[in-house]
């Protein structure tokens, strides 16, 4: 990959449109990016341009497929766009609160880890989990949804608590 780029928000919109990403998905990506931007104001150690581009492009794979495979499809699309590999990693690792290689195999995904590793990956995943369509919902609303869908003791619920704790600790440490 030659000269990988971190596209601006407008460039991300153009990329989404280039791949005929559905309008509702673009609206969703804009909402997630808005939540991410709010966190960026309070957490200076976040790479702002990187995380905004990741939020804008996290669901580009939905231009091909609405299933869990949208992350894999998004990777393929962005690898052809000379996009910074860190953004591609955000796209790969945003699904759920993380998917182990064993779980990926069961789901039919390529057998590898899909678990957020960086602060930017965690933040996009967390912000995406707080978003339904273009509506932001509260932590408790999302938690109740995850408990209903996956069960109280599921790794999804534990992962969501882990994400919240990480973000809350960063927010607290920056207010001191």
Image (cartoon, helix red, strand yellow):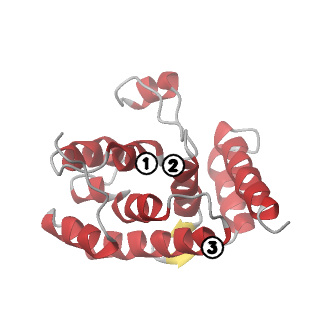
Is residue 52 depicted above or below 110 in this figure? below
Task: Please state the horizontal and vertical placement of residue 13, each as a whole percent of the image.
Answer: 26, 72
Is residue 71 depicted above or below 32 in this figure? above
Residue 17 in sight:
yes
Is there CB contact under 8 Å for labels 2 and 3?
Answer: no
Instruction: State which tag comes first along the sequence, 2 or 3.
Output: 2
Q: Rate crowding at label 1 as few (under 14), some (14 to 19) or many (20 or more) other CA atoms within 10 Å.
A: many
User: Which residue is drawn at the image coordinates 62% and 64% (left, top)?
Assistant: 44
Element on which disc 3 rests? loop
> Which image quadrant for residue 26?
bottom left
Q: Please state if 109 lies on the left or on the right of 147 as rendered.
A: left
Task: Please state the horizontal and vertical placement of residue 54, each as a whole percent of the image.
Answer: 40, 58
Task: Please state the horizontal and vertical placement of residue 88, each as a whole percent of the image.
Answer: 34, 46
To which residue does mark 1 refer?
90
Is there CB contact under 8 Å for labels 1 and 2?
Answer: yes
Quadrant of the rendering where the C terminus is positioned: bottom right
To which residue does mark 3 refer?
137
Element on which disc 2 rests? helix
Is residue 28 depicted above or below 87 in this figure? below
């Amino acid at each position: 990959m030659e000269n990988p780029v971190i596209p601006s928000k407008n460039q991300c919109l153009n990329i989404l449109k280039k791949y005929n990403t559905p309008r509702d998905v673009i609206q969703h990506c804009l909402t997630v990016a808005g939540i991410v931007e709010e966190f960026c104001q309070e957490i200076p150690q976040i790479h702002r341009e990187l995380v905004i581009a990741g939020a804008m492009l996290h669901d580009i794979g939905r231009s091909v497929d609405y299933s869990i495979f949208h992350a894999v499809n998004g990777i393929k699309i962005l690898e052809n766009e000379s996009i910074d590999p860190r953004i591609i990693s955000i796209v790969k690792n945003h699904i759920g609160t993380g998917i182990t290689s064993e779980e990926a195999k069961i789901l039919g995904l390529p057998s590898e880890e899909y678990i957020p590793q960086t602060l930017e990956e965690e933040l996009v995943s967390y912000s995406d989990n707080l978003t339904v369509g273009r509506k932001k919902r509260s932590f408790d609303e999302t938690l109740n949804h995850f408990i209903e869908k996956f069960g109280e003791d599921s790794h999804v619920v534990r992962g969501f608590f882990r994400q919240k704790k990480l973000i809350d600790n960063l927010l607290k440490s920056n207010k001191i």
